[in-house]
Image: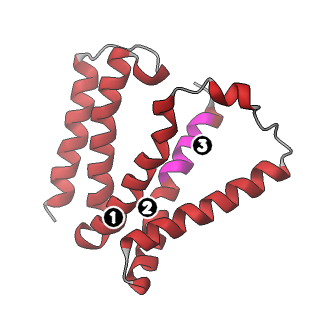
Amino acid sequence: MNSFYIALAILAGIVLPIQVGMNTTVAKFSGSALFASLISFIVGTIGMSAILLSQRASIPGIEQVKLVPIWAWTAGLLGAIYVTSSIISAPKIGATMLFSLIVAGQLFAALILDHYGYLGFPESPINTMRVIGVILVITGFVLVRAN
């Protein structure tokens, strides 16, 4: 496994609780989780636009864009659900519990996606070790919750 991708995945995990804390702060001061989510996506869009332009990355043509399945365009809605749910939940349950539950949910979904090879993931059948891994994560959640 390439160490660059491992480091990138760890970075993604590090920035998520920081992002939730920052978004929660916007929600606290603005009085609206939905507004905080909108601001998060606007700032993200501006940032990604600047990166795209600065890298002089090629922008796909209309013919390439037409090839994208219609359902794939809704991925941003899933991001909005994640961001808004995190903003609402974080102040009530704390970062550790929030991310324990998020990781448990991610692993459950990942097991299904990998098992069937959905959404372009390589097929990797559910087996005993994978199930034990998910159970250990859930056990971790129970321990975190126990205070």
> Please, what is the three-letter code of the amino acid marked with disc 1?
Ala
Q: In this view of the protein, which residue sits in the foreground, 109 or 75?
A: 75
Q: Secondary structure at mark 1?
A: helix
According to the image, label 3 marks what residue? 8
Residue indicated by mark 1? 95
Residue placed under numbered mark 2 in the picture? 17
Residue 86 rendering spot, x and y as whole percentages: 35, 61
Q: Identify residue type, mark 3.
A: Leu
Residue 52 versus residue 111 in the image, above or below? below
> Counting residues from the N terminus, which is met first, the one under dot 1 or under dot 3?
3
- 116 over 13 or under it: above or below: above
Label number found at residue 145: none
Q: Position of residue 38 (x, y in %)?
A: 49, 66
The answer to whether the residues at label 2 and label 1 have Cβ atoms under 8 Å apart is yes
Q: Which residues are magenta?
A: 5-13
Q: How is the image coloured?
A: secondary structure
Q: In the figure, is residue 36 to the left or right of 91?
A: right
Residue 43, by quadrant, is: bottom right
Query: For the residue carrying disc 3, how many other residues have a C-alpha within 10 Å: few (<14), some (14-19), or many (20+)?
Result: few
